[in-house]
Amino acid sequence: MTQALKTSPLSAPQWKLIEKLLSDFDSRQIAWVSGYLAAQDAKPSAQEPSVAPVLIAHGGETGNSRQIALSSAESARMAGIPVEVVDLATTKVRQLRKYEWLLIVCSTHGNGDPPEPIEAFFEALMSDSAPTLSNLQFAVLALGDSSYDQFCVTGQQIDRRLESLGATRLHPRVECDVDFAVPAAAWEAAVLKKLPRTGASDALPAKQEIVATTTVYDKQHPLSVEVLENRRLSNANRRSAIHHIELEMPEGALALSPGDAVGILVDNPPDLVAAILDAIQLSAEACVSVGDRPMTLVEALRQQVDVTIPGAQFLNYWAELSGSETLRAFTDAPIREQRQFLKTVQIRDLVTAYPAVPGAQAFLDALRPLQPRLYDVANEIDGQTDELHLTVKHFHYNFQARTESGIASRYLLALEPGDPVRLYAHTNNRFHLPEEADIPVILIAEGTGIAPYRAFVESNAHRETPRHCWLFFAEQSFEQDFLYQKDLQKAHADGALSRVTTVFYADEPGVSLSDRLVDHIEQLVTWIEDGAHLYFCGDKGRLQACESDLGARVDLSIGDGAWKALNKQKRLHRNVY
């Protein structure tokens, strides 16, 4: 039973009917229906309309929370509710005191961290100096991924903290998995019923986040491009291959700055899809639909749904269909135990171990949507550029007694020239270069974290007077894994890179990236005192350790709190994974 159903006044049959109906809609249709229903419920109020508009705040990294926030704002407008939409990344906690109504849509990053763009807001909210918010009524929609242990934990923490600061919960928190469309729409409709209205269903929002109109491509409407080149950068003997991929880029199709990424809509492996179809005994050509789009079952399984990770919805569906007492026991188990079980199986494990023959559409509807993967752009995109470059590492992981490949990296590394790729732009404002051309930058890269810095350096080379730029780069072997070596050497010779400092783990056993930074601490401190911004990109574990060591040495050299001050000044930029 989903969180939304637990808090809903609907019966189970009514809820199933709504889920089936909404499964045929795309996100824009769901938003329209939500607003329509909310408007139907609007009744003239005997009280004066609220002076302050409803604040809808979003926080995340992939754009899902923003998408829901904007959808909710549109639904509110249709219902005659004045709203403001803001990004928590640019919001101060004290500003919440100006409002009476707050809706927060927030995701959890990785395994329990707040999204990096909203770290400052989150820390301020959790601090002892956070203001009392007894004036506020709020509701939280938490987004997460149940394949992680810390599911929706950021939304949970924000929800509890707002209550502890004196705010009143307007509606119970709803927690959404990656298939968030239905529970998010139900949350939106329920919350809008409880908000004050002006009585004018066409009332415009008092203020709304500016939505770019130049970009026409998004997750629902991706740009399709062709592969131009796919070549291996790392040595052939390296197990985790690293490739450089070049894609065509129609002039002006995507607005991308150095530091931005693209969302790639990947395909599931054909052999995995075939194995699942064999296990469930369905024809690849069976007719199904995704939203309002008809297609074959094999097409849907290849491009639309996650055929690897089972969610709670699939567990419930397959337990009932297969009649397995083992699976039924887990459907009735506590949430934590259920999620732990789901981490031990994949879709093909379930359909093989507990056989059943489903209906094609019902099977498809029980699966989670296939999520886009973000990859940093590895070249500068300007008016003359007709290519987009990516750096991709083959990801492997151990699962039970077998080794699995990451769906996205396996797909991308197998591409050949002429193959189509679906993608869209993902703006990463927090990882852009400083606007002022004379501000120096220190770029710290681990492995494929070099990708956005290649774009930085290209951009710097096109300046009349290049900014001072110092690159620290860590990889395995100088001879086999010095990614983009020739590009970086040329940039150094041309002045676009002031300094290049490297560490290669296999060549220097026991030496870390942190060690190399500490070796140059005096010069680094000089750059920092001259106003330098620092960038961290690559492996999260290693770079967090690196930042901790570097921060301690900077505090020792400049004074206690110096590193924290850099963060407050927004001179630390992180893009870790």
Image: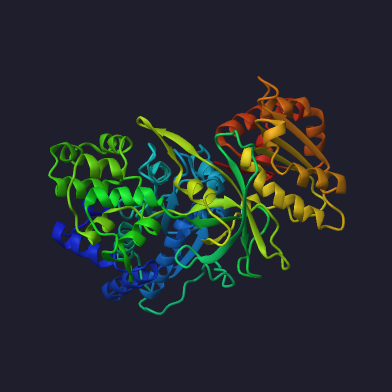
Question: From what the image shows, is residue 35 above or below residue 478?
Answer: below
Q: Residue at x 15, y 46 (%)?
A: 322
Q: Nearer the viewer, residue 445 or 402?
A: 402
Q: Nearer the viewer, residue 481 or 187?
A: 481
Give the x, y percent position of residue 282: 23, 56
Question: From what the image shows, is residue 346 above or below residue 223?
Answer: above
Q: State the scheme by which the image is colored.
A: rainbow
Can residue 84 be seen in the rendering of this structure?
yes
Q: Nearer the viewer, residue 316 or 207?
A: 316
Q: Quadrant of the C terminus?
A: top right
Can residue 290 be seen in the rendering of this structure?
no
Q: Is residue 96 left or right of residue 28?
A: right
Q: Point out the residue furthest to the top here.
A: 510
Quadrant for residue 251, please give it.
Answer: bottom right
Q: Is residue 272 left or right of residue 517?
A: left
Q: Number of marks in the image?
A: 0
Give the x, y percent position of residue 457: 76, 50
Give the x, y percent position of residue 527: 80, 38
Give the x, y percent position of residue 320: 15, 48
Quadrant for residue 214, please give it.
Answer: bottom right
Q: Residue at x 35, y 43 (%)?
A: 146
Q: Nearer the viewer, residue 31 or 318?
A: 318
Q: Is residue 301 left or right of residue 232?
A: left
